[in-house]
Amino acid sequence: MAHTVKGRIQTVLGPIEPQKLGMTLTHEHLVADFSIFQAPPPKHAPHMGTLSLTMENLGLIRQYPYSLSANINLHGEEEHMGEELKFYKKNGGCSIVECTSLGLKRDVGKLRKISMESGVNIICGTSYYIDSTHPSDMDTLTQEQLVSTMVHDITEGADGTNVRCGVIGEVGCSWPLTDNERKVLKASAAAQIATGCPVIIHPGRHTDAPTEIIRVLQEAGGDVRATVMSHLDRTFFSAEEFLEFAQLGCFLEWDFFGLEVSGSPWQSVKTDMPNDAARINMILHVLQEGHADQVVISHDMDTKHRLMHYGGHGFSHILLNVVPMMLRKGISQDDINKILIDNPRKWLTFN
Ligand SMILES: CC[C@H](C)[C@H](NC(C)=O)C(=O)O
């Protein structure tokens, strides 16, 4: 049967009607390996790389989550992920966009199993992550070959299964953008044109990166209004930067809710990671300037220590802790519904 998903949303269990999507986290990981991000240990704990995830070590791990090799590979956590998603559903959550793309050890068969067991809709991703995770033959792969891989993942199935991808992304970009990442961006735009599938981007760590990426996508014919720019809470640091970028018309994503440690191996001394209150304050400002239809939020769960099983905030953090703080800070329930329900639904519906 022809692949007919126009006007619907493609989950790992098949297409659904948009009104079935419900409350949605737009940038998460359930099955992925982020070992490429292993960071050096702090001087006071030179051997932390081989520690176990225990209560005694949790304080150290929360400060240096990417310095512990056991913390940055989510494979093998499927049972705990299933328990997390059942709790998420119990708290009103309905759907999750799982943004593990090629280069992060995606396994859509495991995602299908987690979705079946938890009752939570999962939307999985295609395209390629950052340059350092590209396949060894990326230099010789043509843009047409990249498009073909993405279109196959969307229309036939990924990883040798019949599980079809419902987003193109997260598409990985470094700073500066490499030639192969530029090729992948153009291929992602072409795959979007060919299938009507939405796009989600991981920008490089520079305030100029998001705008450059949008320009590349637009020049390749991409639909900016069906595109999410991720990680803006670690990329923009002033209201002016957010508001100027919002004029371009894509979705803006704050997706590190629950990460409340000031530092990270990649931030400079001038770009401290915000806490949740600072994220909400900036979102409130963007809403007040008329961009309520462009905001989406998530946790970007990419390490074990953030799971409840290991003493973390879990996938229900936004619903249980962030939403009440948003209301206390003056964000209306209508705008919260836009952020968690309406905007994800508009973004994820195939054109
Ligand atoms: C998986 C995301 C990257 C490790 C990194 N995360 C943070 C918190 O900075 C990023 O590039 O966003």
Image: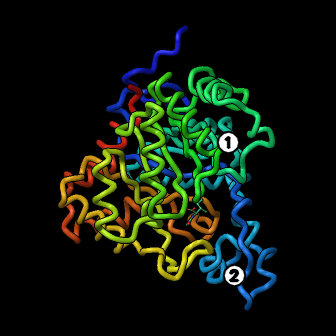
Q: Which mark is residue 57?
A: 2
**Residue 121: x and y, percent?**
48, 38
The residue depicted at 77 percent of the width and 80 percent of the height is 48
Instruction: Name the residue tied to disc 1.
Output: 102
Tell me the kind of residue under disc 2.
Asn
**Residue 61: x and y, percent?**
65, 77
Q: Decide which of 37, 180 is in the foreground and name it.
A: 180
Q: Is residue 316 visible?
A: no
Q: Does dot 2 land on a helix, a strand or a loop?
A: helix
The residue depicted at 58 percent of the width and 43 percent of the height is 182
Please report contact status of discs 2 and 1: CB closer than 8 Å, yes or no.
no
The C terminus sits in image quarter: top left
Nearest to viewer (mark 2 / mark 1): 1
Q: Decide which of 109, 179 is in the foreground and name it.
A: 179
Q: Is residue 91 above or below residue 309?
A: above
Q: In terms of image quarters, where does ligand 1 lie?
A: bottom right
Tell me the kind of residue under disc 1.
Leu
The residue depicted at 58 percent of the width and 59 percent of the height is 175
Q: Quadrant of residue 188?
A: top right
Q: Which mark is residue 85?
A: none
Q: Does dot 1 land on a helix, a strand or a loop?
A: loop
Q: Decide which of 323, 343 is in the foreground and name it.
A: 343
